[in-house]
Amino acid sequence: EAQVTQNPRYLITVTGKKLTVTCSQNMNHEYMSWYRQDPGLGLRQIYYSMNVEVTDKGDVPEGYKVSRKEKRNFPLILESPSPNQTSLYFCASSERGGVNTEAFFGQGTRLTVV
Amino acid sequence: AQKVTQAQTEISVVEKEDVTLDCVYETRDTTYYLFWYKQPPSGELVFLIRRNSFDEQNEISGRYSWNFQKSTSSFNFTITASQVVDSAVYFCALGHYTGGFKTIFGAGTRLFVKA
């Protein structure tokens, strides 16, 4: 089954404690992306990756890091989480960004930073 | 600057009514892509449609239809004969290439369909 898998689904952490949200896709997609969803703001792109070892900033990259060492995985790293990073996070993948016909999203990770 | 505006924050209709969700976008690019996604109460995001800027043909898929008008920078979504299962948040999004491919989402429209 084609899918994007995020882990964990829910996470409560304390300010400053490094964390990683994993994202894995099984469709051999080149393009992967991270978004955060906040009430009234829709989804905002954090980082994206056009292919292995190619990553770039989205609209809200501050406080986040990513890596793309292999095609299937695109982890999101919060080196020193702060309460303003409390949000719902989605990972997505697609064949080639906007050129393909469908984007697949993970189920979301609800992060709370206290 | 790229921007997507979904002016309707919430819409409430009664089942079987038709409803149109508005989406207005801003871009200076000549090549861009427009999307609609559905987020049901369960929280996942479901892709509905993608349109590129060179294809202004309207599209119909069952009870769903989309009206793309470059002259007014709009990409509106109509649900005909709405059903309770259509209750969800709907997002319009604009994608474009700036070296890489970036996507800007609107704030979303929450649709309530009452039985």
Image (cartoon, rainbow, N blue to C red):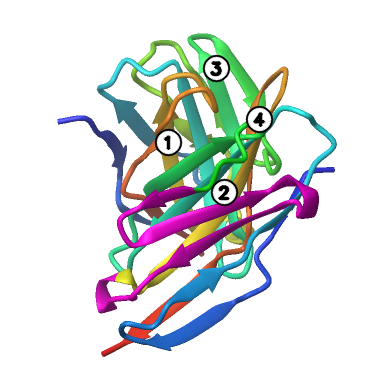
Residue designated by label 4:
B54
Which type of secondary structure does the marked residue at label 1 adopt? strand
- B78 part of magenta stretch: yes
Tell me where the magenta segment starts and ends, as one range. B59-85
Is the residue A55 above or below the residue B10 in the image?
above
Q: Determine which residue is flagged by label 2.
A: A81
The quarter of the picture where the N terminus of chain B appears is top right
Residue neighbourhood size for the residue with mark 4, other residues' Cα within 10 Å, grouped as few (<14), some (14–19), many (≥20): few
In this rendering, the label closer to the viewer, 4 or 1 = 4
| First reached walking from the N terminus: tag 2 or tag 3 | 3
Can residue B63 be found in the magenta stretch?
yes
Looking at the rendered structure, the number of numbered marks drawn on it comes to: 4
Chain letter belonging to callout 2: A
Check contact, mark 2 vs mark 1: CB within 8 A.
no
Q: Is residue B48 above or below residue A61?
A: below
Q: Label 4: chain?
A: B
- Residue A15 can be seen, yes or no: no
Q: Amino acid at mark 3?
A: Met
Task: Compare residues A110 and B10 and report the one nearer the observer.
Answer: B10
